[in-house]
Image: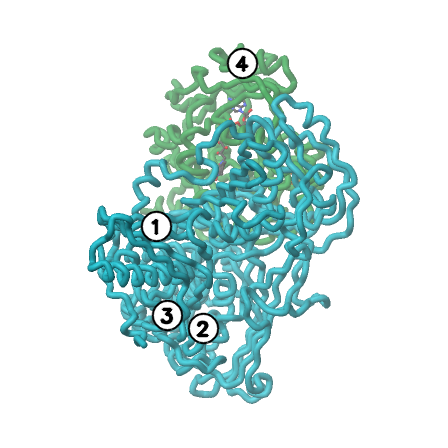
C-alpha cells in the first residue's frame, strides 16, 4: 500500500478535474473494492477523490416513465426502493444476491459497475496477470479457472466481470451517464464493459477521469415480471458461478419478447442476443427454452476448470425461463 | 483402594447450562485478545514472504525500506538472531536465505505504525535462485514413504488376519477411493502476538492453544530457560488446532522484538498470510476395501491412506485411526503413506485424523449397506464390535448403536425409502443420510492445579490452561466447585498464563480431562487438609497442589466417544446446488460438564463438518506452490444461509473409568462424520455418488 492523498468532492466538475489531471488518481465510492486493492497493492493511486457526497444519491422517476438511479445510491437502498422492487424486480434480486449486508450498505451504483474481476491471480501481485500489468502473461490460463469465462475470452485474459447488478442492468438495457474531462455522454450499459481482446487491462470503454453520475432504467413493463437467478458455491456471500437475469413476455403460449443476460460467463455481463432472437415468436415451452440456451452457448469455450459452466448456464437459463413462463401462465 | 465408581465426582454444578463466566466481557468487547493487551508504545511488524516455492534468496535489498520514515528496523537472515537447533524446521526461520515453501518468512519490517511497516515491506527487493519445486500430491507417486508413527504416536500401519484373502472370497465387496482436499483452519481471531524483550527475558501475549506449549517451543530456540519466557493468553478467538504448536509467526515476532529491545512488537497476521504460515489439514486420498458375507457381516476392512507432509518438517495425519475402532471384522489392515512436498507444514485441524478418516470409510459403509441390501443403520448395528477390534480391550463405554437408534427415532428414519433419486420437492431432489461419529478420549500428562482456600470463604483455583472459545473458564469453575463441594460463586479461577501452574494445551479434546482431573485431585487434598483444621480455614489460608493423577483404567479399556449424524439434503435438479435443510447429531460422550457450552461445541463441530462437506477447499496451484483462494471471499466456509435446522443432543452416558468427572471431551467429536452423512444423503437424493469433497454443484449437474 502506498501513501495517498484524500479529497472529498462536493461538485462533479471538481471531482472530474481533480482526477483528470493526475494520472494516478481515482474516484472513491464505497471503497469496498478499491480499498481492498490498495491493501493488496493491486491499485496504487496517489490521490483518492471521494465521490460519495456528490448530489447523486437520488432515485427518481423520469418523464418518459423510466427511472434515474444516482451513481452514489447505495446498493442496499437501491434494492429496497419500492419502485425498483415493483417494476424491476430483477435488479432488486440481483443486488440482494450480491456480497453481504454490510458491503451493500457501503457499495455504490457507480462503484458496483466498475468493480474489478475477482480472478485470484489478478488480486495477488506475486502472480503474473495481463490485466494488472499488460504483457506479464495470464496466470489463470493453465491454472485455477473455476470462476472464469466461457464466452468472449481472449488468449490474454479469461476473467469474468463479477457484478450481479450489472447483469440485471444489461438485461434491462440501462443507460449510463458519464461526465468526463471532455464533457458528458451516455453509454448503453451493454457497451460499457469490454471483452478483453488484446487490451485486457481495460475493463470498460471509460477513459481516465470519466465519472459515472447516474444510470437510467428505461420504461419496460415486461420487467415487472423479471427474475435474477444466481448459482453459486454457497448460499450467500459468494460470487456467481453463473447467473441469469431475465424478463419474459408471453402471450397465448408464444414468446413475444425476451430480455436475457448472463453473469459469470464472460469479461462483461453477457447479453444473450442469440437466445432472445431464438425465443421471439417461439412457443413458450421447455424445448424452445433449451434450444435458445443451447444456441446462446454454442460458441462457449471452457478452460481447464469450468466446462461445467456450459450445462450449468444452459440449465439455469431454462429453469429461469420456465419459472417466468409459469408465472405468466398463472 | 477406591473403586472407579467411588472416585467419581458428585455432579451439582456439573451438567448445568451455566452461562459463560467471561460472556459479558466478550460481548462488551472488554475481554482482551492477544494484540489488544494495552502495552506502552508498541511497534508493528509486517513480514516479508518468499515469492517462490523453493530456492534461495541470493540478495535482499532493504535500503528503500530502511529509508522510509517511521521504520525502526528491517529484519532479514543477515541480522536475525541465531536460533539454537531444536529439530523443528518450521520454526527455525531466517537462519539462511533458503526457501522451503512459498510464503515462508524471509524477514520483516518493524515500524511505528502497521501501515508504514506494510508499505516498507513492499519496498524490499528480493533476488532469488530458484530450484524446481514439487507440491503435487498423487497416490501414484513413486516416492511415498512410511512415517515412523502417525500423529501423535500411533502405529503407522496395522494388520490382523488375511484381509486380501478374505476380500477375495467375500460374497459382497467394495473397492473405492475417496478424497478430502487441503483445508485451512481460519479461526475468527487471526494468529497474533505481542513480543517484548526486557532484561534478556521474553514476554509473549500470544493467541495460543497452550501457553506452556508456546513456552516449550520458543524458549530453547532462543536458548532461554523456560521461566525466561512468559506467555499470556487469557482469551483466544478460536484455534481449531492451528494455534496448538506455535508457528513461525511467533518466532518472527520474538526476533523482531529483539531488534527494538524494551518495545513491544505487535504482529497480527492478515487472513492471506494465514494461508501460508500457520498450517492446514493435509489433503487425503483414502482407498477403502470392504468384504462381507450374505448377511452383511464384514469379514474384511482395509484403509490405505496417502497424504502429504512438508519437507521442512514432518506431520503425519492419523487418518486411518478411526477405522481401527469403528467396526468388527476378523481381517483388517490400515496404512499411511506420505509424500514430502515443498509446501507449508500441515498441522492439526479440528479432529486431525478422525475428521478426514470418518469421511471415506463412512461413505463406504453406506455404499456397502446398499450393496448388501441393508439399511445403513442396520448394517452398522450388524457390525458393531463387542470389544475394540484391534486392541481387543473392552470399551469403557460405547453407545454408537444407542445413538443410531435414538437418532433414527428423532429424525424419522423408520419409513425411509432406500431408493435413490426418487423424492422431489419442486425443482429439488430430496434425500436423507446417516453416518457415525467417533473421537478418542485423550488425556495429556503434566498439568498441575493449585487451590487456595482463604478465610473469606473463597477458593482460588490456578492452572495454566487456556480458553480458546470453548468455555474453559466456565467448565473448570464448575468442576472445581463440585470437587470442593461449594457453589460456583465461591470459586475464583485463573487460567491463561505461564505464571500459573504448568498445564497441557487445548488439543485432542483433552482439556477438561487433563485440567479437570488435577483440579479434582487438588480439591480433594485441600478438603482433607481443611478437615485437619476442623473444617475452618486458618488465617494464613490452606493450599493444595496436585498433578495429573495416574489413571489405571487407561491400559484396561478402550476409551472413545461416539455419535450418529443424520442429514437431509436437497440437490437442485437444474443447477446442482446442494442445500442441507436439516442436520441432527446424537452423541454419547460421557458426562457433559456444561450443557450450554457443550451443546455449542457439538453444534460448532457439525457446522464445520457441513462447511467441509459443501465448501471448504484450499486450491493449491502447482506452478506457484501457493493457495490461490487465500482469503475468506474465495475460500468458502459455511454462512448462516447454508445452515438450516441443526439439532444436537446426547445420551446420558455413565463412564466411571475415563476420569473423576466421567467426561470424554467433545470439541472435535461433532465434526466427525458430518461430511459423510451429507454425502450419503446427497446420493440418496440424486443417485450420484460423490467420493471427493467438497460437494460442489457441478458434481451433481446433468
Ligand atoms: C467479500 C466480497 C464479496 C462480494 N460479493 C459480491 C457479489 O456476490 N456480487 C457482486 O456483484 N459484488 C460483490 N462484491 C463486490 C461489491 O459489490 C463491490 O465491491 C461494490 O459494488 C463496489 O462498490 P463501491 O462503491 O464500494 O466501489 P469502490 O471500491 O469505491 O470503487 C470501485 C471502482 O469504481 C470506481 N468508481 C467508484 N465510483 C465511481 C463513479 N461514480 N464513477 C467512476 N468511477 C467510480 C473506483 O475508482 C474503483 O475503481 C463483493 C465484495 C466483497 C469485498
Ligand atoms: S484471467 Fe485476466 S485477470 Fe486473471 S490472470 Fe489472466 S489476465 Fe489476469
Residue A56 in picture, x, y percent from top left? 44, 18
Q: Residue at (55%, 27%) from the top-left corner?
A: B113
Q: Residues within 10 Å of mark 2 (few under 14, many from 20)?
A: many
- Give how far apart the Cα atoms at labels 1 and 3 are: 22 Å
Mark closest to the chain's N terminus, 3 or 2 = 2
| Pointers 4 and 3 in contact (C-beta within 8 Å) | no
Say which residue label 2 marks: B366
- Give how far apart the Cα atoms at labels 4 and 3 are: 71 Å
- Give how far apart the Cα atoms at labels 2 and 1 are: 40 Å
Say which residue label 1 marks: B473
Mark closest to the chain's N terminus, 1 or 3 = 1
| Pointers 1 and 3 in contact (C-beta within 8 Å) | no
- Give how far apart the Cα atoms at labels 3 and 2 are: 31 Å
Q: Is label 1 in a helix, a strand or a loop?
A: helix
Q: Is label 4 in a helix, a strand or a loop?
A: helix
Residue B2 in picture, x, y percent from top left? 30, 75
Specify the quadrant of the image occupied by residue B438: bottom left
Dividing the image into four quarters, tell me where ligand 2 lies.
Answer: top right
Residue A197 in picture, x, y percent from top left? 69, 35
Q: Is label 2 in a helix, a strand or a loop?
A: helix
Mark closest to the chain's N terminus, 2 or 1 = 2
Say which residue label 3 marks: B658
Disc 3 is attached to a residue of which chain? B
Quadrant of the image containing the N terminus of chain B:
bottom left
Disc 1 is attached to a residue of which chain? B
Say which residue label 4 marks: A15
Q: Residues within 10 Å of mark 3 (few under 14, many from 20)?
A: many
The hue used for chain A is: green
Amino acid at each position: 500500500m502506498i501513501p495517498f492523498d484524500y479529497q472529498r468532492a462536493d461538485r462533479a466538475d471538481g471531482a472530474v478535474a481533480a482526477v483528470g489531471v493526475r494520472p494516478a488518481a481515482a474516484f472513491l465510492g464505497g471503497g469496498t473494492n478499491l480499498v481492498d486493492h490498495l491493501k493488496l497493492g493491486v491499485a496504487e493511486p496517489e490521490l483518492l477523490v471521494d465521490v460519495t457526497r456528490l448530489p447523486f444519491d437520488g432515485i427518481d422517476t423520469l418523464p418518459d416513465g423510466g427511472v434515474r438511479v444516482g451513481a452514489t445510491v447505495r446498493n442496499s437502498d437501491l434494492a429496497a426502493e419500492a419502485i425498483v422492487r415493483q417494476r424491476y424486480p430483477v435488479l432488486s434480486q440481483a443486488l440482494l444476491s450480491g456480497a453481504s449486508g454490510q458491503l451493500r450498505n457501503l457499495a455504490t451504483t457507480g462503484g458496483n459497475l466498475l468493480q474489478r474481476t475477482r480472478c485470484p491471480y489478478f488480486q495477488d501481485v506475486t502472480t503474473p496477470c495481463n490485466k494488472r500489468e499488460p504483457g506479464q502473461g495470464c496466470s489463470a490460463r493453465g491454472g485455477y479457472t473455476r470462476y472464469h469465462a466461457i464466452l468472449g475470452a481472449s488468449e490474454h485474459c479469461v476473467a469474468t466481470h463479477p457484478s450481479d447488478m450489472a447483469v440485471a442492468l444489461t438485461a434491462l438495457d440501462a443507460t449510463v451517464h458519464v461526465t468526463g474531462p471532455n464533457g458528458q455522454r451516455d453509454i448503453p450499459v451493454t457497451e460499457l464493459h469490454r471483452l478483453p481482446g488484446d487490451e485486457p487491462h481495460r475493463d470498460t470503454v471509460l477513459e481516465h477521469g470519466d465519472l459515472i453520475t447516474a444510470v437510467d432504467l428505461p420504461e419496460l413493463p415486461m420487467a415487472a415480471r423479471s427474475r435474477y437467478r444466481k448459482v453459486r458455491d454457497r448460499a450467500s456471500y459468494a460470487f456467481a458461478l453463473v447467473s441469469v437475469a431475465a424478463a419474459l413476455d408471453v402471450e397465448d403460449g408464444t414468446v413475444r419478447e425476451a430480455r436475457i443476460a448472463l453473469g459469470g460467463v464472460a469479461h462483461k455481463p453477457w447479453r444473450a442476443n442469440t437466445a432472445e432472437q431464438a425465443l421471439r415468436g417461439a412457443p413458450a415451452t421447455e424445448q424452445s427454452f433449451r434450444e435458445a440456451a443451447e444456441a446462446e452457448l454454442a460458441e462457449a469455450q471452457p478452460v481447464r476448470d469450468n466446462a461445467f459452466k456450459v450445462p450449468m448456464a444452459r440449465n439455469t437459463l431454462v429453469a429461469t425461463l420456465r419459472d417466468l413462463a409459469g408465472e405468466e401462465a398463472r | 483402594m477406591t473403586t472407579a465408581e467411588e472416585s467419581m465426582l458428585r455432579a451439582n454444578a456439573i451438567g448445568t447450562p451455566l452461562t459463560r463466566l467471561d460472556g459479558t466481557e466478550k460481548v462488551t468487547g472488554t475481554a482482551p485478545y492477544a494484540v489488544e493487551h494495552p502495552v506502552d508504545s508498541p511497534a508493528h511488524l509486517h513480514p516479508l514472504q518468499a515469492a517462490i516455492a523453493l530456492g534461495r534468496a541470493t540478495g535482499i535489498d532493504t535500503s528503500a525500506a530502511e529509508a522510509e520514515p517511521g521504520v525502526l528496523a528491517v529484519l532479514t537472515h543477515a541480522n536475525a538472531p541465531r536460533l539454537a537447533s531444536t529439530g523443528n524446521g518450521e520454526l527455525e526461520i531466517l537462519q539462511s536465505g533458503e526457501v522451503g515453501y512459498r510464503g515462508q518468512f524471509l524477514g520483516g519490517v518493524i515500524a511505528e505504525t502497521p501501515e508504514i511497516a506494510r508499505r516498507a515491506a513492499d519496498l524490499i527487493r528480493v533476488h532469488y535462485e530458484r530450484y524446481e519445486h514439487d507440491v503435487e500430491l498423487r497416490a501414484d507417486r513413486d516416492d511415498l514413504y512410511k512415517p515412523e508413527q502417525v500423529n501423535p504416536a500411533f502405529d503407522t500401519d496395522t494388520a490382523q488376519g488375511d484381509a486380501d484373502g478374505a476380500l477375495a472370497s467375500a460374497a459382497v465387496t467394495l473397492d473405492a477411493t475417496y478424497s478430502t482436499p487441503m483445508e485451512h483452519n481460519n479461526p475468527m481471531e487471526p494468529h497474533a502476538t505481542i513480543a517484548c524483550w526486557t532484561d534478556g527475558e521474553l514476554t509473549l501475549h500470544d493467541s495460543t492453544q497452550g501457553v506452556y506449549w508456546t513456552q516449550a517451543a520458543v524458549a530453547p530456540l532462543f536458548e532461554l530457560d523456560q521461566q525466561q519466557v512468559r506467555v499470556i493468553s487469557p482469551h483466544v478467538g478460536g484455534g481449531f488446532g492451528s494455534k496448538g504448536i506455535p508457528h513461525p509467526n511467533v518466532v518472527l515476532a520474538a526476533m523482531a522484538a529483539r531488534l527494538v529491545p524494551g518495545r513491544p512488537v505487535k504482529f497480527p497476521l492478515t487472513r492471506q498470510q494465514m494461508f501460508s504460515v500457520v498450517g492446514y489439514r493435509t489433503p487425503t486420498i483414502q482407498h477403502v476395501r470392504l468384504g462381507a458375507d450374505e448377511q452383511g457381516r464384514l469379514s474384511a476392512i482395509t484403509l490405505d491412506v496417502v497424504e502429504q507432509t512438508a519437507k521442512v518438517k514432518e506431520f503425519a495425519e492419523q487418518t486411518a485411526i478411526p477405522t481401527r475402532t469403528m467396526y468388527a471384522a476378523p481381517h483388517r489392515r490400515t496404512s499411511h503413506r506420505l509424500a514430502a512436498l515443498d509446501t507449508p507444514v500441515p498441522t492439526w485441524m479440528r479432529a486431525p485424523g478422525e475428521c478426514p478418516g470418518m469421511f471415506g470409510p463412512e461413505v463406504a459403509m453406506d455404499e456397502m449397506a446398499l450393496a448388501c441390501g441393508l439399511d445403513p443403520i442396520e448394517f452398522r448395528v450388524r457390525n458393531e464390535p463387542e470389544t475394540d477390534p484391534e486392541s481387543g480391550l473392552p470399551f469403557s463405554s460405547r453407545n454408537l448403536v444407542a445413538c443410531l437408534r435414538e437418532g433414527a427415532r428423532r429424525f424419522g428414519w423408520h419409513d425411509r425409502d432406500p431408493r435413490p433419486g426418487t423424492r422431489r420437492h419442486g425443482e429439488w431432489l430430496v434425500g436423507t443420510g446417516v453416518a457415525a461419529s467417533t473421537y478418542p478420549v485423550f488425556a495429556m500428562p503434566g498439568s498441575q492445579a493449585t487451590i487456595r482456600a482463604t478465610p473469606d470463604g473463597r477458593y482460588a483455583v490456578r492452572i495454566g490452561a487456556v480458553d480458546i472459545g470453548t468455555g474453559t473458564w466456565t467448565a473448570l469453575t464448575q468442576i472445581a466447585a463440585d470437587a470442593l463441594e461449594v457453589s460456583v460463586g465461591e470459586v475464583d479461577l485463573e487460567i491463561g498464563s505461564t505464571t500459573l501452574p504448568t498445564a497441557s494445551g487445548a488439543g485432542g479434546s483433552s482439556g477438561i480431562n487433563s485440567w479437570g482431573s488435577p483440579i479434582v485431585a487438588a480439591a480433594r487434598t485441600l478438603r482433607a487438609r481443611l478437615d485437619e483444621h476442623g473444617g475452618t480455614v486458618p488465617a494464613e489460608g490452606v493450599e493444595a497442589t496436585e498433578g495429573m493423577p495416574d489413571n489405571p483404567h487407561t491400559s484396561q479399556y478402550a476409551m472413545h466417544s461416539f455419535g450418529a449424524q443424520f442429514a437431509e439434503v436437497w440437490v437442485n435438479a437444474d443447477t446442482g446446488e446442494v442445500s442441507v435443510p436439516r442436520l441432527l447429531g446424537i452423541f454419547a460422550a460421557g458426562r457433559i460438564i456444561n450443557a450450554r457450552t457443550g451443546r455449542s461445541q457439538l453444534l460448532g463441530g457439525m457446522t464445520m463438518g457441513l462447511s467441509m462437506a459443501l465448501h471448504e477447499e484450499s486450491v493449491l496451484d502447482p506452478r506457484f506452490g501457493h493457495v490461490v483462494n487465500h482469503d475468506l471471499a474465495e475460500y468458502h466456509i459455511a454462512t448462516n444461509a447454508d445452515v438450516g435446522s441443526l439439532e444436537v443432543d446426547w445420551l446420558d452416558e455413565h463412564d466411571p473409568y475415563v476420569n473423576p468427572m466421567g467426561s470424554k471431551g467433545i470439541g472435535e467429536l461433532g465434526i466427525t462424520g458430518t461430511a459423510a452423512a451429507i454425502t450419503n444423503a446427497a446420493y440418496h437424493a440424486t443417485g450420484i455418488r460423490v467420493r471427493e469433497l467438497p460437494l460442489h454443484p457441478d458434481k451433481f449437474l446433468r
